[in-house]
Amino acid sequence: MPSKQTCKQLSFYSILIVLPFIILLLVELLLRVGGFGKNVPLFIEVAQNASNSVSYLEPNPKVVTRYFADEKLAPQVSPDTALFKKHKDGDSFRIFIQGGSTAAGFPYGRWASLQGMLEQRFKRLYPDKNIEIINTAMAAVNSYTLVDFVDEIIEQQPDLVLIYAGHNEYLGIMGVGSAFAAKGSRLTTLLHLKFKEWRIYQLLQQLYFSLLAADQQQLQTDKTLMSQVVKEKEIPLASELYNQGLLQFKDNMALLLQKYQAAGVPVLLSNLVSNESGQVPFSSIGSVDWQAYQAVLSKSAKAQLQANVAALNSALSEPRKLAENMAEYTTAQHYYKLALNLQGLAQYQAAKAAFVLAKDHDLLRFRAPQAFNDIISELAQQEQVTLVDNQALFNAHADHGIIGNSMILEHLHPTVDGYFLLAEGFAEVINQQQLLTEPAQPYSRVKARLDVPVSKVDKLYGDFVITKLINDYPFKVVSSTNTRESKNIPLPSSNKLEADALITRLNKGNWLQLQQQLLVKYQQAGDIAEAAKIAGVITTAMVNNHQAAYVAGQLYQQLNDWQLASYYHKQALLVPELSEQEKVRYLLALAQDYFLMGNYSASLARLTMADKMVPASAPLKATIAQYLKSATQRIAAPRK
């Protein structure tokens, strides 16, 4: 038994050890009570009307500020607005999406994103399934952000997670070559992510930046985001920074997947695609006049192309000679020249390999190297993780298997066709594995392409944004002249209706008001297909807007598209706060959809419900009786 003196000493040392932690906790509590610091959750509650009994959440538009001690230094990026129920319905299948700007649908926005494309696709494939899709993707983020979001996503009870990420690992927020750099080693950065909500930590950060780092980082809002994020313009293949990026991506993604595995959440992990033939190596811009080179190449005879290939292969086989001429040549531009010549000779397989090598050797790393896809394939071998081979899908649809400008706008963001295909890669796996627990309704990819929710104005907006982007760094050598040119990009050609709407959108006008105006104007112009698309996106975005859902259904009826008409009429009926008059109108519309689809029993069921709600003296009663008679006769009629 220890002596009294020993017990006193143990008590003293215990108090001595515990006391600093008690003091820290008290300081933390005082800072919180005093309102110091910030808490930036991934999801925030949405204010609703008093009549609305359902609570909704949405991704926090300011979530990126959690990574910056001073919010003024944060880039202007955010997840798209998408409402979902705070309390998950028992029959809901909830899908979360993680990734960067491609997963977010840049430059077109939500309706080109994985969320927008899949929402539209599932209206055909799973018309009776309650599916919620929530997109947390945003520009400039990488695997650190994905790891940081995972616990909050798991709290929202996901049934499936879709991931498309990797292109921002070097030059995104907390990338190894980024101006918004990581906090030292990977362990240090992970600790930073753990402690960033602590008010003491935030206080120390503020003191550090105010005293030591005030002038180290200035956000230049007149520059493109790509211009802002670049710190390391040269990250050679197999260099220390390059390998650090590979390791960061691999370890962070492994940690992310482990968390989902522990929570029992299946993950679809896609490999990455980027422009192979249509994007010259960024590190060669300014040292090669690619427009002139390709113009000469297009006029070259076969013998000249073969001579070019031989010369380029000879230079590439002599690294010492190549190193001596680095002022004139870089490996990336050599591979790209080789690829162009091989393409001219119709040696497409060899050309593709050279294009990929050109991308991998590009020193300015805005595109993930092929090694990232190797890591993704390895990670997808784990339980509850499935590979979505979008690279193979794009290769199969690309000209001669080489991904170019028909599918990718600039270096890595897809065209509308490309975005549709990217989403199809995920939809295919979901369907094949029956992850939604029921077989999909048959609906061909060719017909589904006509359904894409990207409107004409969305398309114009995206074209304008991309034109502005590629007229600035890193697509051009920046000078005062072309900087002025990049700020004066002409609007893409369009009619007055769409040009006016584009200007409103560029001036950040109210989205809902703009869509409502377009809905009316397209109907007046007789463009029912575009009007139906607009009504559909309003319905999807404004979850309780039963009037928009009804209008969408009516417009699809005009197009004789009874399947989508019935989908939107059902959406109108799902809104809790409906008057009896509205319910009757929506039930009759849905009954008509089912009748014209040949589903007479479903039509009869809706007619019966409407009939019970209409007073016997109402003029509508006779009309309903006639419809009931027709549906009953069709059910009773023998099938041919």
Image (cartoon, rainbow, N blue to C red):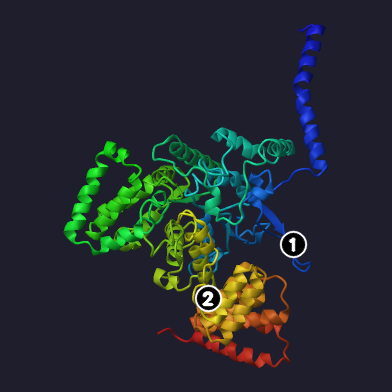
Determine the secondary structure under disc 2.
helix
What x and y, as percent, mark residue 159?
56, 53
Viewer-side residue, 174 vs 48: 174
Where does the image place residue 241, in percent across and percent down from the top left?
46, 37
Residue 158 vertical position relative to residue 602 in the rendered view, above or below: above
Using the numbered discs, state the Cα–Cα distance from disc 1 to disc 2 in whole angstroms.
Answer: 30 Å
Q: Position of residue 419 (x, y in %)?
A: 46, 63
Q: As drawn, is 625 to the left or to the right of 242?
A: right
Residue 632 vs residue 410, the one in the foreground: 410
Quadrant in which the N terminus is drawn: top right
Indicate which disc residue 564 carries.
2
Report the amino acid beneath label 2.
Answer: Leu
Query: First in sequence: mark 1 or mark 2?
Result: 1
Question: Around disc 1, counting alpha carbons within 10 Å, would you say few (fewer than 14), some (14 to 19), or many (20 or more)?
Answer: few
Q: What residue occupies the far front of the structure in this picture? A: 481
Question: Looking at the picture, does residue 320 appear above or below residue 130?
Answer: above
**Which circle marks residue 47 in the picture?**
1
- Residue 539 appears in the rendering: no
